[in-house]
Amino acid sequence: MNISNDIKYIGVNDHKIDLFEGQYIVPNGMAYNSYVILDSKIAVLDTVDYDFKDEWLDNLAKVLQGRKPDYLVVHHMECDHSSIIKEFNRLYPEATIVSTMAAFNMMKNLFGAEFNPNKLVVKEGDILSLGNNTLKFIQAPNVHWPEVMFSYDEYEKVLFSADAFGKFGANDVEDDEGWACEARRYYFGIVGRFGVNVANVLKKVSSLDIKTICPLHGPILNDNIEYYVGLYDTWSKYEPENKGVAIAYTSVYGNTKEAVLYLASKLKSLNVEVEAFDLARDDMAEAVERAFEYDRLVLATTTYNGGIFPFMDSFINTLVEHNYQNRRVAFIENGMWGPMAIKTMKLKLEGLKDITYLDSNITIKGHVNDDSKLALDKLAEELAK
Ligand code: FEO
């Protein structure tokens, strides 16, 4: 695939993967992107996951047509992009590896002290000239690891954005939901904790004239660049993207679920967009994604071992780790004796920025009765405001 006359795609699609990064379901597979810039000098940009070594090296050889690469630019050292660096160096020992000092330190750990390629350490603003194409390097620490950098080809106006602007899903599968849904789940799962760092790098690239974004995962973005950058801007600032209510719940015998479904149907009757997630059965990463997408969240769970049900514990831990903030939150607890869930959930959320708690919290003692329904009606009205 050609990105431009000089920039070629040599990435691969992974349809064998069960869990990306060991935890995220990827029903449409995953793409590991890699690029080559063919100019007077040749730069290869990142490698791919080790399972695709032969396919990637074949893709590279086809594009090189007998020429030798001068550089391997390493934007990110996570293994889905870096694991073939050593093999690349064995096959093309004259090529210089270009990356940040932090990345070279990681290479030492990953490939051993004996790994000693030709090196070029780059930092913010450094330029690598390949002929017409020139790569300008932009440090992007913690988007997603500390060594990450972007690069910008001033000639082609292409931003190589490492993990940023990536999404779940292989590139040979049409994503019926459009770009944003799986890009959002990917962002809040993988990069979401580092909103400040994402905002910092967005500020740095805001002055660039970008015609194409080439991320390390997902499709190449070459139209409506403002749309993608705008979403990243919203996400990085933890601003709600859409108005609506995410309900995350656990239910052991169906009573808490009944309360949640009652609340959801009330909210719908009030024209409020609502999505409910059974944390034990639905994809938790999607529940996290929706919690960040919407401006309101309801947490509903059972009192369990004097605290809360394990799946809710894990969900709230993820929200806290990912700097959840700037939202309205309400609680529903269930407990036949000594209900403790609301107290426990509030304690866990303590310290998060700009969380507003609604007044109408609900305690159910086992079964949803008429009083519970009246309380849920009141909560729906408060949420709808
Ligand atoms: Fe796609 Fe952070 O690796």
Image (cartoon, grey):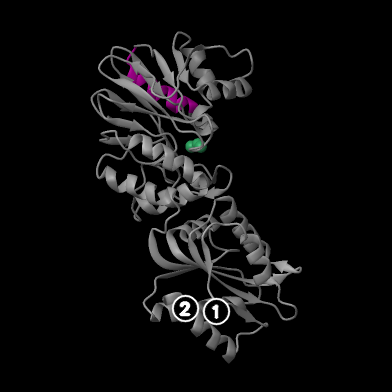
At horizontal 40% and vertical 31% (from top left) the residue drawn is 11
Q: Taking 331 as reference, is 194 above or below it?
A: above
Q: Provide residue 36's location: percent of width, then percent of height.
A: 35, 23
Q: Taking 98 as reference, is 202 above or below it?
A: below
> With 267 as the anchor, is 105 left or right in this view?
right
* Residue of label 2: 382
Report if the beta carbon of the residue with label 1 is closer than 8 angstroms to ligand 1: no
Magenta-drawn segment: 53-66
Circles 1, 2 touching at the beta carbon (< 8 Å): yes
Camera-side residue: 173 or 350?
Answer: 350
Q: Is residue 135 shown to the viewer in this render?
A: yes
Please state, as top left, top right, bottom left or bottom right, where the N terminus lies in the image.
Answer: top left
Q: Taking 166 as reference, is 360 above or below it?
A: below
Please state, as top left, top right, bottom left or bottom right, where the C terminus lies in the image.
Answer: bottom left
Report if the beta carbon of the residue with label 2 is closer than 8 angstroms to ligand 1: no
> With 329 as the anchor, is 68 left or right in this view?
left
Magenta span contains residue 65:
yes
* Residue of label 1: 360
At horizontal 57% and vertical 57% (from top left) the residue drawn is 352
Which amino acid type is shown beneath numbered disc 1? Answer: Ser
N-terminal of the two: label 1 or label 2?
1
